[in-house]
C-alpha cells in the first residue's frame, strides 16, 4: 500500500463523538514513550502527522487521521505513565475502554511494545484484557534498531512464553519495526491493505462508505 493522503480529522475524549464515517479503523496504543508518534509518522510518510515529544504521556485524546480517504488510523493515549495522576489515568482508561468495546468501525488494534525491554507485566496485562474482550489486535515491536537481532529474537520469545503462561493458545501476529530505519513499514502497510480488502469484500456497510 502507498500512502497518498493522510489528514488529521478530530481529537476528542468521547468515543461516541468519533467520526461517523463507516470506514475501517486501526488503533495504535502502547505504553507511553514506546515510540508511537514516530511510528505513525514513519508509516504515513509525514514528519509531523502525530506530534512527537520528549515528554511521555503527551497524547491524551483519541486522534483520528483519515488515510487515503478509505481508512482511519487512530492514535490513542499511552498507558502506564507513572507521572499521570490516578484520576487522569482512570479517565483515560474509561474512554479507551469505551472506544475498544463500542467502536463498530474498529477492525484491528496494534499494541506497541518497546523491544529493548524484556516482557513487561503491564503489556501482558493489557493484551490479556484485549484477548478477554475479544478485541482483534496485533503486536508491533518498536525500536528494533536499538538492540541486536539476537536480543530482538530473545525478547520476542520471552513475550511468547509469558503469553503461553497466561493461557494464550498462540501469540498474536506481530511486526518488528524501527521508525528511524523504516523497518517493518512495508509489512505493516501490506497487512492493513489486505485486511481492508477483506473488510470491504465481506461487509457491505464499509463498502458503501467509500
Image: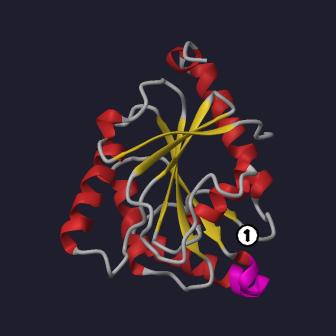
Farthest residue, direction left: 87
Residue 79 vs residue 48, the one in the foreground: 48
Residue at the spot x=50%, y=81% of the render?
119
Q: Is residue 3 left or right of residue 66?
A: right
* Location of residue 132 (image quadrant): bottom left
The image position of residue 122, as x and y in percent, is: 38, 75
Residue at the spot x=62%, y=56% of the render?
173
| Residue position for label 1 | 178
The image position of residue 156, as x and y in percent, is: 62, 76
The vertical placement of 42 against 122, above or below, is above
Secondary element under disc 1, as helix, strand or loop, is: loop
Majority SS type along the magenta span: helix
Q: Is residue 69 left or right of residue 92?
A: right
In the rendered structure, which segment of residues is drawn in magenta? Answer: 145-152
**Could you tell me which quadrant the N terminus lies in?**
top right
Graded by Cα atoms within 10 Å as few (under 14), some (14 to 19) or many (20 or more), the crowding at tag 1 reads many
The image position of residue 85, as x and y in percent, is: 24, 75
The image position of residue 86, as x and y in percent, is: 21, 73
* Location of residue 110 (image quadrant): bottom right
Residue at the spot x=26%, y=67% of the render?
89
The vertical placement of 67 against 98, above or below, is above
Residue at the spot x=61%, y=22% of the render?
200
Residue 174 seen by the camera:
no
Residue 81 seen by the camera:
yes
Amino acid at each position: 500500500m502507498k500512502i497518498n493522503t493522510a489528514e488529521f480529522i478530530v481529537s476528542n475524549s468521547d468515543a461516541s463523538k468519533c467520526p461517523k464515517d463507516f470506514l475501517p479503523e486501526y488503533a495504535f496504543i502502547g505504553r507511553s514513550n514506546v515510540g508511537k508518534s514516530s511510528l505513525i509518522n514513519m508509516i504515513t510518510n509525514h514528519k509531523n502527522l502525530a506530534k512527537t515529544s520528549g515528554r511521555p504521556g503527551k497524547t491524551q485524546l483519541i486522534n483520528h487521521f483519515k488515510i487515503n480517504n478509505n481508512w482511519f488510523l487512530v492514535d490513542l493515549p499511552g498507558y502506564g505513565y507513572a507521572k499521570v495522576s490516578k484520576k487522569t489515568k482512570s479517565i483515560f482508561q474509561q474512554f479507551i475502554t469505551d472506544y475498544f468495546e463500542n467502536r463498530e468501525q474498529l477492525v484491528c488494534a496494534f499494541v506497541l511494545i518497546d523491544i529493548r525491554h524484556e516482557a513487561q507485566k503491564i503489556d501482558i496485562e493489557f493484551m490479556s484484557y484485549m484477548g478477554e474482550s475479544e478485541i482483534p489486535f496485533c503486536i508491533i515491536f518498536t525500536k528494533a534498531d536499538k538492540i541486536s537481532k539476537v536480543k530482538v529474537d530473545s525478547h520476542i520469545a520471552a513475550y511468547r512464553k509469558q503469553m503461553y503462561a497466561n493461557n494464550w493458545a498462540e501469540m498474536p501476529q506481530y511486526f518488528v519495526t524501527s521508525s528511524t530505519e523504516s523497518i517493518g513499514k512495508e509489512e505493516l502497510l501490506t497487512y492493513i491493505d489486505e485486511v481492508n480488502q477483506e473488510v470491504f469484500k465481506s461487509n457491505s456497510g464499509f463498502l458503501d462508505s467509500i
